[in-house]
Amino acid sequence: MTNSETLAMFKSSGALLDGHFKLTSGRHSNSYFQCAKVLQYPEYLSAICSEIASQFRDSGITTVISPAIGGIVVGTEVGRQLGLKTIFAERKEGTMTIRRGFSIDPSEQVLVVEDVITTGGSVVEVMELVKATGATVAGVASVVDRSNGKVKLADKQFSLLMMEVVSYAPEECPLCKEGIPIDAPGSRANTKS
């Protein structure tokens, strides 16, 4: 699947938004990938996750983990297609943790799956959780890499859609300076500010 085919899925499902957005990373942008809107359609979910799964099918992966909330749907489907144990990490009082009785054995080879990577912050937090168990981070995958490959998190890393999307530190944001209202649709800040 090419970048243009994937981008067409985002556009046709209304998952590529234009405006003024506060990203989960805290940075601001005029574009927002709302993966949940494209992943709500089974045919898109299956096609996207099939592309990701195919990249890791012969990698010795034993477990898939995703950061909540954005990565859960894509991680679960990738895990299902690979026939692997699939879990997620979530924030408790602002700190990424493995809860709900999930555990990782030191012998596991773990694939971290996220919906969108901008700075990679949430993925790095999950990777640190995996490493703390003694397990190996065997790869990182995402649906969208907003850095166009500049954010390198693992030796084996795959993103279906790679684009360089401009983002700004809040104090440098030209959209803020123009007084354009900001929307924060991400999982950590889903209210307008």
Image: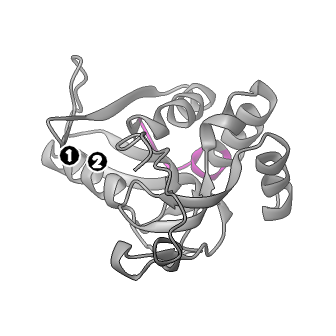
What x and y, as percent, mark residue 151?
44, 73
Residue at left offset 51%, top offset 35%: 75
Q: CA distance from mark 2 to mark 1?
A: 5 Å
- Check residue 30 in the rendering and tell me which mark sits there, or answer none: none
| Residue 61 colored in magenta in the image | yes
Q: Secondary structure at mark 1?
A: helix
Q: Secondary structure at mark 2?
A: helix
Seen in the image, is 151 located left or right of residue 93? right
Q: Are marks 2 and 1 in contact (CB under 8 Å)?
A: yes
**Which residue in the structure is indicated by mark 1?**
129
Seen in the image, is 164 located left or right of residue 79? right
Front position in the image: 6 or 80: 6
Q: Is residue 102 above or below residue 36?
A: above
Q: Amino acid at mark 2?
A: Val
Q: Is residue 145 above or below residue 86?
A: below
Disc 1: CA contacts within 10 A as few (<14), some (14-19) or many (>=20): some
What x and y, as percent, mark residue 84?
48, 27
**Which residue in the structure is indicated by mark 2?**
126
The range drawn in magenta is 54-64
Residue at left offset 77%, top offset 38%: 47
Front position in the image: 21 or 162: 21
What x and y, as percent, mark residue 191?
42, 40
